[in-house]
Image (cartoon, rainbow, N blue to C red):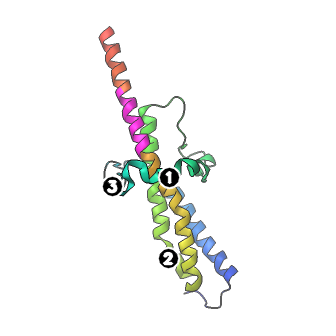
């Protein structure tokens, strides 16, 4: 248990150290997790309340999603989150899997909020945890916004590749 006499700033520093440590650990663990998520079932499948993306349009996700930090821009071993010009179905599948892992990682960070409260007095831990959880929500929302679009693009690309292969097979 933390000392009750900790000041606001001392508590804030302890909290930031705790969330930074778990954030870095979660980031690197996320890089090690096999990319085999079934994005067509819960928890990755869109829920009814998401209303085929209308919820995200109301939240204006398309306006702010590109302005939130992206670790793949600084850590070169991570899969880049942008669609490249020469994308194929396999590349889109990798991006879809990345959205699943990112969603799990940020949800895990939110779920750990009660643990962080053990490091600071409760009068600071609860508000810090609420702010931290709210800070992770945009990352989860962005993954849930992007995933259906990536799946649709992948399906269209697979159909196009299949038609192209059939035409080439017919020419022979």
| Mark closer to the chain start, 1 or 2 | 2
**Quadrant where the N terminus is found in the figure:** bottom right
Q: Which residue is mark 3?
A: 48
Most frequent secondary structure within the magenta stretch:
helix
Total number of numbered discs in the rendering: 3
Q: Residue at x 55, y 40 (%)?
A: 82
Q: Which residue is mark 2?
A: 115
Compared with 75, 162 (above or below) is: above
Q: Which residue is mark 1?
A: 142
Query: Is 156 one of the magenta-colored residues?
Result: yes
Disc assigned to residue 104: none
Observer able to see residue 2: yes
Q: Residue at x 56, y 64 (%)?
A: 135
The answer to whether the residues at label 1 and label 2 have Cβ atoms under 8 Å apart is no
Q: Secondary structure at mark 3?
A: helix
Q: Secondary structure at mark 2?
A: helix
For the residue pair 62 and 168, the one nearer the viewer reads as 62
């Amino acid at each position: 248990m933390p000392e009750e006499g900790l000041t606001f700033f001392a508590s804030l520093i302890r909290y930031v150290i705790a969330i930074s440590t778990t954030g870095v650990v979660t980031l690197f663990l996320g890089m090690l997790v096999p990319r085999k998520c079934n994005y067509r079932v819960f928890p990755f499948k869109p829920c009814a309340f998401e209303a085929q993306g209308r919820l995200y349009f109301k939240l204006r996700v398309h306006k702010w999603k590109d302005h939130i930090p992206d670790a793949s821009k600084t850590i070169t071993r991570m899969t880049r989150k942008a669609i490249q010009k020469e994308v194929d179905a396999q590349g889109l599948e990798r991006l879809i899997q990345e959205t699943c892992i990112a969603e799990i990682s940020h949800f895990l960070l939110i779920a750990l909020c009660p643990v962080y409260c053990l490091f600071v007095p409760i009068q600071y831990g609860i508000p810090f945890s609420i702010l931290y959880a709210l800070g992770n929500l945009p990352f989860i929302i962005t993954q849930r916004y992007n995933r259906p679009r990536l799946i649709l693009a992948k399906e269209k690309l697979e159909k196009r590749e299949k038609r192209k292969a059939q035409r080439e097979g017919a020419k022979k």
